[in-house]
Amino acid sequence: MSSTTCLRHLPTFAEHRDALRDALVDVTQESFFSFAEICDPARFADAVANADGRGRWLSSRVSFTGAFAGVLQITLPHGLAVELLAAFAGLTPDDPVSDAQVLDSTGELANMVCGRWLTKACVHRRFDLRQPEVVPAAAPPAIGAGAGEELLLVNDQPVAVRLDFLPS
Amino acid sequence: MNATPGLESAAAGVPMRPLNVLIVDDSAMMRMMIKRVTGLCEVPIGRIFEAANGAEAITILEAEAIDALFTDINMPVMTGTELLRTISGNPRWRDLVRVIISTDGSEARRNEVKDLDVRLYVEKPFRPEVMRDVLYNLSAASPDVC
C-alpha cells in the first residue's frame, strides 16, 4: 500500500482488501489459534444456517481516526466468540466463562484486526483507535449488503467483517 | 539446566532473583493471556501485577518493586505513551525495563515513544514464543535480575 493511498481522504475498500485479509488471518491464527479462510456468499449462507450460538450473534466495532477515518465491524456467532475466548485466554472446558470475558475478547479481536490492518496498510501514518464496542446483534449479517464487506469462516463458523470509511 | 540464552547468566553462577512484572492493558483477557504466556516461560518470574490503564500502573509502580513493565498504548484514562512520559526521567524508575505490547506498530507510533526508554516493542498479535524471547532478552540483558 503506498503512502499516497494512505493520504487520500476517502479510500476504497478494494484498496485495503488484501491488507485487511492478511490482518484477519494473522490475528485469528496467532492470537486465537484458529483457522480462518475467505469464503463466498453461498458458503457463508450455509455456515450461517448452521452457526453455533443458538441464534445469538455479537458485533464488535472499532472506530479509527488518522490519515483517514472509519469503522471496522466484526459480526460473529456467540458460540464462536466463546470458542475464541477459550483459545485466546487458554481456558479449559471446565473453566467458567462470563459474559464480560466474552465481550472483552471479542472486542480485542476487532481491536487487533483493526490495528494490524492499519499498521500493514499505512505503516508511516499514525492512527488512533477508540475502545471497541461489543453489542449483541439481533440477526446474522446481511450477506452481500455492501461492497465494504469481507466474508470468512473461522473454524468453519461464519464471520462478517465490514469496513466503512468516513469523511475526516 | 538447558543452555537457554536468557538463563546462561544464571548457570554461570550469577545470583538469581525472580522478575516482578507489571502488565498494563485495558483488556482483562489480554492481561490474562500475557500473564499465562509469561508463566509458561522458563525465566524465573516473581509476582505479576495487573493494571487496566496508565494511572493504575503508576499507583502500583509507586507501591511495589517492579522490574519489567509491559504496557499497551491505546487505553482509557491514561494511555501507555502518557504513562511512559510520566515515569521517564524519574530516577526512581531508572532501572525499570519498559516493553510496549500494542496493535499499533506504525513507524509514527514507534517514533513517538523512541525517547521514552522503551527496550522492546512487541506488536499484537504475537505468538507465545515471542513473549518467551522477550523475557529471555530481558533476563540476558539484566543478569542481576535473572
Image (cartoon, helix red, strand yellow):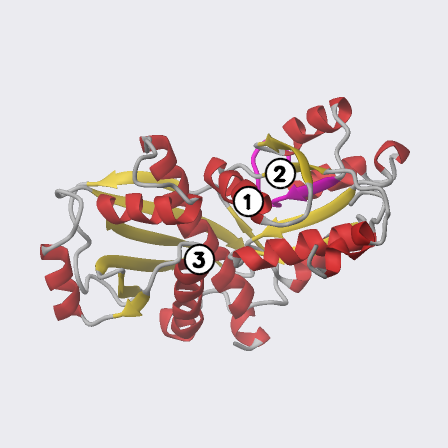
**Residue A41 image-quadrant placement:** bottom left
Around disc 3, counting alpha carbons within 10 Å, would you say few (fewer than 14), some (14 to 19), or many (20 or more)? many
Q: Amino acid at mark 2?
A: Ile
Are callouts 3 and 2 both on one chain? no
Q: Residue at x 42, y 48 (%)?
A: A88
**Rendering coords of residue B20 (x, y %):** 71, 35
Q: Are the residues tagged 3 and 2 within 8 Å (C-beta)? A: no
Q: Are marks 3 and 1 on the same chain?
A: no
Numbered badge on residue A149: none
| Same-subunit check for callouts 1 and 2 | yes
Above or below, A48 relative to A14: above
Establish if A101 lies above or below B56. Answer: below
Residue B109 picture location, percent across and down: 66, 56
Residue at far right of view: B91
* Percent coordinates x, y for residue A104 in the rendering: 41, 38
Left or right: A153, with B39 as reference point: left
Asked which secondary structure carries label 3, the reply is helix
Q: Which residues are magenta?
A: B68-78
Disc sitting over residue B34 in the figure: 1
Q: Nearer the viewer, mark 3 or mark 1?
A: 1
Q: Which residue is mark 3?
A: A113
Amino acid carrying mark 1 in the image: Ile
What chain does badge 2 belong to?
A: B
Q: Position of residue B110 (x, y in %)?
A: 70, 58
